[in-house]
Image (tube, rainbow, N blue to C red):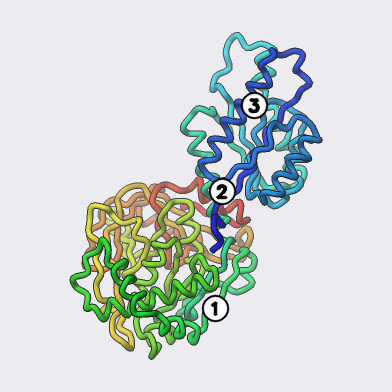
């Protein structure tokens, strides 16, 4: 991948109106400049910021437009410092028609004082400036969202961060192609996505042929394999593994890493249960360890050829810092929770840091050359969000992202020999929430994210032009 290709590029568009200069104290403009600089510093926590200075005229708007175009801005934060003609801001947006717009009303005070006077009305007139431009955005059909609050409040800063993380997630989905190793399991209609559907989402896919995979697998050198084995077992209990089982799984992991580098891919999907992997005479094992090792490098793969789930993982990692491929197993109707787990792979960054990570032979899914390596760990407890992405022709943009916020209340089903946790829905009982999950169009694969991520995912789906469905 290109260096910093995932860095969010943010434009700060702050407008100012000099009509009132004669009526205001001499320091007024300097105060508006300090306000914008404070916003610039806040936004720089989330990406690379282009700030062309206060836009105080249509000519300044044209300068801002050129600066934004040169920086190839992903998102513009329109943050007026006061009421200003909307033409200033609108001109500034003309050069980046595809950039997402956040209309930010960042007041410097949460209160309207009793001694409010005409001078304060001018000084604090940014809500007037905000709605002046949002009207134009609606008229022109420009995609945007709004945020309003006290610039000094943690809540507003958290909302800004959530939206920008969501936009970074949307960018990650489209920034690099996916690779697909093996076709989906025959008959798995709920994980399929047509080329037309993928194209409508702005995602490109490279189908890796078995010959290319075998060539990469056979080309892994002895020293490369030795180093890869050392990295794979670091921080893990691997006492149950035969060295040959570990080496073969690491060899496959390095081969898939090579394919990602060759195709500049951020992830995708593998199907172990077919001729590409388990029943491939040259490979003959599952890719569970490879999926786990790729997650360490911020490359995320779903199983059984489920490319939409792979996209959900990439999106989830960008917004939450971790994303675990999983399935929703049995409902515990008595204690009101749902068992989430998988067959032995995934993002270790969602693991409970106080519990061991184990590497074991994947005896449940033997291949032509025996078992691959399964990874097992307990999921960290705390707030969490389940997500599932699927093509849905009736949904906005032809896709729906289904989400359910809740929490991991425990993790103890170690006999499953894979990542596992007990998820409790915030929306209601496990039976009613799971029924809603089905009715919303979720698939049998999900991505589990740490934290409550509704804000981020709402921004991401808006930027992607698809539908968000909350359970």
- Secondary structure of the residue carrying tag 1 is strand
State whether residue 439 appears in this view: no
Of mark 3 and mark 1, the one earlier in the sequence is 3
Residue found at x 67% / y 49%: 71
- Secondary structure of the residue carrying tag 2 is helix
Q: Mark 2 points at which residue?
A: 459
Above or below — where is 33 with respect to 440?
Answer: above
Q: Where is residue 465 in the image (x, y as percent from the top left)?
A: 63, 56
Q: State the CA–CA distance, disc 2 to disc 1.
A: 30 Å
Q: Is residue 400 left or right of residue 56?
A: left
Q: State the CA–CA distance, disc 3 to disc 2.
A: 28 Å
Q: Name the residue under label 1.
A: 207
Of mark 3 and mark 2, the one earlier in the sequence is 3
Q: Is residue 366 left or right of residue 312?
A: left
Q: Choose between 258 and 106: the one closer to the eye.
A: 258
Q: State the CA–CA distance, disc 3 to disc 1.
A: 51 Å
- Crowd rating for badge 3 (residues with CA inside 10 Å; few <14, some 14–19, many 20+): some
Q: Choose between 381 and 170: the one closer to the eye.
A: 170
- Mark 3 vs mark 2, foreground winner is 3
Q: Where is residue 262 in the image (x, y as percent from the top left)?
A: 53, 73
Q: Position of residue 401 (x, y in %)?
A: 52, 58
Rendered-image quadrant of the N terminus: bottom right
Q: Position of residue 268 (x, y in %)?
A: 49, 69
Of mark 2 and mark 1, the one earlier in the sequence is 1
């Amino acid at each position: 991948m290109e260096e910093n290709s995932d860095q969010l590029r943010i434009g700060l568009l702050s407008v100012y109106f000099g009509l009132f200069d004669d009526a205001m104290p001499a320091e007024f403009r300097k105060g508006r400049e300090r306000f914008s600089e404070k916003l610039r510093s806040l936004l720089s926590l989330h990406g690379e910021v282009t700030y062309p200075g206060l836009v105080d005229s249509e000519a300044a708007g044209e300068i801002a437009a050129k600066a934004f175009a040169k920086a190839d801005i992903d998102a513009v934060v329109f943050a007026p410092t006061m009421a200003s003609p909307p033409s200033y801001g609108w001109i500034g947006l003309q050069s980046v028609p595809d950039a997402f717009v956040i209309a930010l009303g960042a007041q410097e005070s949460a209160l309207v004082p009793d001694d409010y006077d005409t001078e304060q009305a001018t000084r604090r007139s940014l809500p007037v400036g905000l709605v002046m431009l949002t009207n134009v955005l609606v008229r022109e059909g420009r995609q945007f969202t709004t945020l309003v609050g006290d610039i000094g409040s943690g809540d507003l800063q958290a909302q800004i961060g959530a939206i920008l993380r969501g936009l970074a997630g949307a960018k990650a989905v489209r920034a690099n192609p996916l690779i697909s190793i093996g076709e989906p399991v025959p008959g798995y209609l709920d994980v399929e996505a047509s080329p037309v559907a993928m194209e409508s989402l702005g995602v490109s896919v490279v189908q890796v042929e078995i010959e290319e995979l075998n060539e990469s697998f056979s080309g892994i050198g002895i020293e490369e394999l030795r180093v890869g084995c050392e990295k794979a077992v670091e921080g893990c209990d691997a006492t149950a593994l035969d060295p040959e089982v570990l080496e073969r799984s690491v060899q496959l992991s390095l081969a898939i890493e090579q394919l990602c580098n060759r195709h500049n891919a951020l992830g995708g999907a593998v199907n172990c249960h077919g001729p590409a992997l388990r029943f491939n005479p040259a490979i003959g094992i599952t890719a569970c360890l490879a999926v786990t090792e790729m997650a360490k490098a911020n490359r995320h793969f779903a199983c059984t050829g489920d490319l939409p789930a792979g996209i959900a993982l990439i999106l989830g990692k960008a917004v939450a810092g971790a994303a675990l491929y999983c399935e929703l197993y049995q409902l515990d109707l008595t204690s009101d929770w749902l068992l989430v787990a998988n067959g032995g792979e995934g993002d270790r960054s969602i693991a409970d840091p106080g519990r061991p990570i184990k590497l074991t032979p994947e005896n449940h899914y033997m291949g032509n050359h025996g078992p691959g390596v399964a990874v097992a760990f307990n999921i960290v407890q705390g707030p969490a969000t389940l997500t599932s992405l699927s093509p849905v022709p009736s949904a906005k943009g032809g896709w729906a992202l289904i989400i359910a916020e809740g929490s991991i209340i425990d993790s103890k089903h170690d006999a499953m020999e894979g990542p596992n946790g007990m998820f409790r829905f915030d929306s209601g009982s496990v039976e009613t929430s799971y029924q809603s999950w089905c009715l919303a169009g979720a698939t049998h694969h999900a991505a589990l994210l740490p934290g409550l991520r509704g804000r981020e995912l709402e921004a991401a789906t808006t930027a992607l032009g698809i539908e968000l469905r909350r359970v």
